[in-house]
Image (cartoon, rainbow, N blue to C red):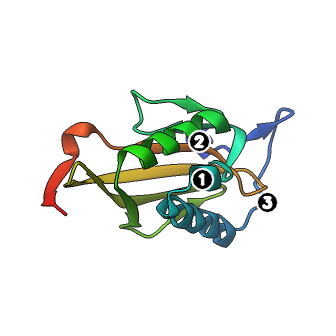
Amino acid sequence: MQRSWMRYPRQNGHSVRMSVAHSQVRAWAENYLDVVNRRDPDQIAELFALNATVEDPVGPSLYEGRDAIRGMFERAATALSLMEIRRATPISVAESYAAFAVMATTEMGGTRQEVDVVSVFHFGDDGLITSMRAFWNFEEVRSVGPN
């Protein structure tokens, strides 16, 4: 018996395997990190499919569509004098999904903060992100002092 979490996506009632190589999915995930660290909301938005979703953090925040996602990153870039994410674990890939942990460092009002985040991405065959879920919460944000 095949468990539901092991099934491949379904198309026209049939299971289909994704045609994207794991190395390509890893490269797309690395590119996301590079582009986000440049802090350009337009470049970041271009990484997402038009109808993509972002939950950052998972639970209270859902952004639907490229324009909403761009707005989220624009607000963050405007409010924060520093916004940097560094990969903290290897990128794990399963079909067209990538998951990895990052250390997110921000600075606002002269105070630097850090939070550990686990991110899960789904990529379309075209390399665009169709969904991104960032697992973290405000209670885990740590102040690391002034810059």
Residue 31 sits above or below residue 108 on the image:
below
Q: What's the CA distance linking mark 3 and mark 1?
A: 24 Å
- Which one is earlier in the sequence, the residue at label 2 or at label 3? 3
Residue 86 position within the rendered picture, expressed as x and y whole percent measured from the top left: 39, 66
Residue at 70% over, 52% down: 128
Residue at 65% over, 72% down: 23
Q: Quadrant of the C terminus?
A: bottom left
Task: Find the residue positioned furthest to the right.
Answer: 12
What is the crowding at mark 1: few (fewer than 14 residues within 10 Å), some, or many (at least 20)? many
User: Residue 9 or 119: which is nearer the viewer?
Assistant: 119
Name the element at disc 3. Answer: loop
Q: Amino acid at mark 2?
A: Arg
Q: What's the CA distance linking mark 2 and mark 1?
A: 7 Å
Q: What's the CA distance linking mark 2 and mark 3?
A: 28 Å
Residue at 40% over, 61% down: 85
Residue 108 position within the rendered picture, expressed as x and y whole percent measured from the top left: 27, 49
Q: Amino acid at mark 3?
A: Ser
User: Residue 85 or 12: which is nearer the viewer?
Assistant: 85
- Which one is earlier in the sequence, the residue at label 2 or at label 1? 1
Q: Amino acid at mark 1?
A: Ile
Q: In the picture, residue 58 is in which quadrant?
A: top left
Q: Which mark is residue 19?
A: 3
Residue 107 position within the rendered picture, expressed as x and y whole percent measured from the top left: 27, 54
Residue under numbered circle 2? 70
Residue under numbered circle 1? 44
Left or right of residue 80, residue 124 in this image = right
- Which one is earlier in the sequence, the residue at label 3 or at label 1? 3
Q: Quadrant of the N terminus?
A: top right
Residue at 65% over, 35% down: 67
